[in-house]
Image (spheres, helix red, strand yellow):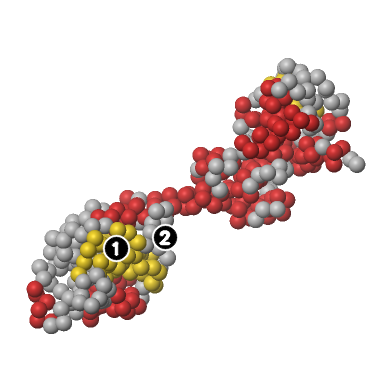
Amino acid sequence: MSRDDKCPCFARYAFAARQLGTARLGLFDSAILLAMPPELTIDPELRSLIPPLHPKEFEQLKENIIRDGCREPLSVWRTDGKLILLDGHNRLRICREHNVKFQIVETDIASREHARLWLEICQAGRRNLTSSQKAMLWQSIAERRAALSRSERARRGGLAGGRGREKKTVLPTFLSKGRIRAAIAAESGLSERMLRAARKVRLKAPDLAARVREGQMTLAVAYREIRRAEHKQKLCSAASLRSKRLAGLYDVIVVDPPWPMHHNIEEMTNFDYPTMTVAQIQSDVGTRIQRHAARDCHVFVWTTERFLPETFGLLEAWKLEYTFTMVWVKDGGFQPRLYPQLNTEFIVYGRLGQPRFLTTKEFQTGFAAPRRGHSRKPEAFYETLRRVTGGRRLDMFNRRPIAGFEEWGKGSSVLRARPPSVLESTLSYGQRRARG
């Protein structure tokens, strides 16, 4: 049986030595010190590169060391007259707290940057790491390798120009990012998609990268957080809002149609706002959506139990893709004879293009809120939309001003008779799209 088989720690050290390549490693067969040298130095920066153990894993390690002793040696690096601990911080802590003897193995490493790389490669061999933690480690390993390679080639760089000619320094030709990523993926057993995500998290959000590395967050969650932030910045940037304002385009459109609530069309004037037939709603609102919806647009259409089937037909006529229906549960409602009380209203959601929500956390299709007068929609609905969507928002046929929304329609408190954009009459549909 080889020493690697007897001692998993040696296997990880040998693995690190093989991976590091150009570093001066190899003193694994040197004499192992049996004493507990007090001069071992804990380097905070190197220690921070080690993903922490889960509390249960630490307790299990402590129990094993107290019962069987410290069977795996601690790896140290001698530099500037000090013995700096590279690997074995948890074991050292347990041994010192419980007066357990330990062994050390001295590793010869060329520089501090090589020490960082050696340590991360060694940690990448741990079996208790999640795939997210491994992806962050391997992406860091790839970046350190590239930096060391560039530094080494620059140090050696330069080609002799021959007799009578000056020596010219020439930068080496590197592999493409795609080929480097493919090589790391094959070496680590991880997908290139995970490594791309890890690279983006490391570049865009170092705080999230640290949390992933420590096992407090998955890589997928961190990546989604970054994508949401980028999407929000794209929607809400001053330039984007200004461009859409000039073109009269909106990222979110809420429609509260003035449904024909009476069978007799002559009685439609009984409401405190004018009503419209379904055909009129289809034509008028459809024209507005065609003119004012951005390329990727959320559309929410309020409807009642009676007009729910017609609403699905409207979405189809407006070329919107139906996705889900939200339900407002009210604290009361009209109850027809021999039928249950109608204490719900519906918001049918359709989308144009491929709009994305900023977040789906606590975004539910059902919500309860009290009534505040006829056709007055609950503030809870608008609070949700302000949280999960960005960009310009339009509320058509609303009954009151809503924070974060521009208003238009016959039921609006402003009673605007003109379209939302001053330039609507002068810009064609294609021009508005191009300018948005």
Indicate which disc residue 306 carries.
Answer: none
Q: Nearer the viewer, residue 343 or 384?
A: 343
Q: Does label 1 or label 2 sit earlier along the sequence? A: 1
Q: Residue furthest front?
A: 338
Residue 436 visible in rendering: no
Where residue 101 sits, quadrant-wise, is top right
Between 77 and 431, the one nearer to me in the picture = 77
Dot 1 amino acid type: Trp
Residue 25 vertical position relative to residue 81 in the rendered view, above or below: below
Rendered location of residue 169, percent (x, y): 69, 39
Q: Position of residue 120 (x, y in %)?
A: 68, 38
Q: Is residue 94 left or right of residue 313?
A: right
Q: Residues within 10 Å of mark 2 (few under 14, many from 20)?
A: some
Asked if residue 198 lies left or right of residue 156, the reply is left
Tell me where residue 229 appears, x and y as whole percent. Answer: 43, 49
Could you say which disc has been placed on residue 328 in the image?
Answer: 1
Residue 16 visible at all: yes
Residue drawn at x 22%, y 55% is 402
Q: Is residue 19 above or below residue 63?
A: below
What residue is disc 2 on? Answer: 356
Secondary structure at numbered mark 2: loop
| Residue 410 position in % (x across, y down) | 15, 68
- Label 1 crowding class (10 Å Cα cut-off): few <14, some 14-19, many 20+? many
Circle 1 or circle 2, nearest the eye = 1
Mark 2: amino acid: Arg
SS state under label 1:
strand
Question: How many discs mark residues in the rendered view?
Answer: 2
- In the image, 70 versus 202, the foreground residue is 70
Residue at image point 24% right, 60% down:
331
Q: Residue at x 19, y 79 (%)?
A: 277
Q: Find the distance from the CA under tag 1 to the CA under tag 2.
A: 23 Å
